[in-house]
Image (cartoon, helix red, strand yellow):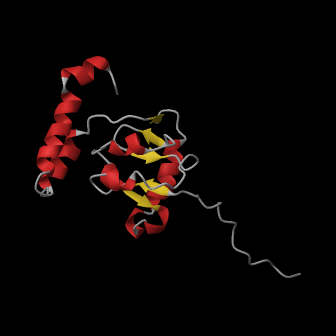
């Protein structure tokens, strides 16, 4: 009798469209959630993920991320491949709640963006946006 030398079955592939990667960790700019027509972003303590079951591959979130943390799965850098499975797994956890409106970014993200040498005018725009997030009216009306 011949012995089978078939490799062990592989787990099914994870089909995603867009993936949030390492640049979002401790940064958490949330501009991307405002433009998402499917509300597919989930918020964890230190970063966001995309629910692969909801994402429709519209790409509207990509240009909104000021730190370039969102990639199409086909363009995902090799060193960031593990975020494909991580997004899919974390999006299913009940503790990772849907986020549908922008929030104030984490301080580490603001400082990282400032330290990157912002183009002319972007520093002013960043400060203006942060002042809106931190305003009494924004906090009082709980529009987030």
Q: At which x and y percent is residue 37?
A: 48, 43
Residue extending furthest top? 140
Residue extending furthest right? 1
Q: At which x and y percent is residue 10?
A: 65, 65
Viewed as shown, does residue 32 lie left or right of 39?
A: left
Q: At which x and y percent is residue 138?
A: 25, 24
Q: Residue at x 27, y 52 (%)?
A: 66
In the rendered view, tell whether residue 39 sits above or below residue 65: above
Q: Nearer the viewer, residue 17 or 64?
A: 64
- Rendered image quadrant of residue 77: bottom left
In the rendered view, tell whether residue 68 sits above or below residue 41: below
Residue extending furthest bottom? 2
In the rendered view, tell whether residue 3 sits above or below residue 103: below
Q: Residue at x 38, y 40 (%)?
A: 34
Viewed as shown, does residue 12 lie left or right of 60?
A: right
Q: Nearer the viewer, residue 129 or 2?
A: 129
Q: Residue at x 18, y 51 (%)?
A: 112
Viewed as shown, does residue 132 lie left or right of 8?
A: left
Q: Nearer the viewer, residue 86 or 17?
A: 17
- Rendered image quadrant of residue 107: top left
Q: At which x and y percent is residue 93?
A: 52, 38
């Amino acid at each position: 009798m011949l012995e089978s030398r078939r490799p062990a079955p592989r787990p099914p592939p994870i089909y995603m469209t867009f993936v949030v990667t390492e640049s979002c960790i401790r940064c958490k700019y949330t501009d991307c959630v405002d433009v998402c027509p499917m509300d597919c972003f989930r918020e964890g303590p230190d970063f966001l993920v995309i629910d692969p079951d909801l994402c429709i591959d519209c790409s509207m979130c990509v240009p909104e991320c000021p730190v370039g943390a969102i990639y199409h799965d086909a363009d995902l850098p090799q060193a960031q491949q593990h975020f494909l499975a991580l997004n899919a797994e974390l999006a299913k956890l009940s503790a990772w709640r849907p986020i549908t409106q922008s929030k104030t970014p984490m301080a580490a993200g603001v400082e990282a963006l400032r330290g990157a040498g912002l183009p002319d005018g972007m520093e002013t725009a960043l400060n203006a946006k942060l002042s809106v997030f931190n305003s009494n009216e924004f906090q009082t009306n709980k529009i987030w």
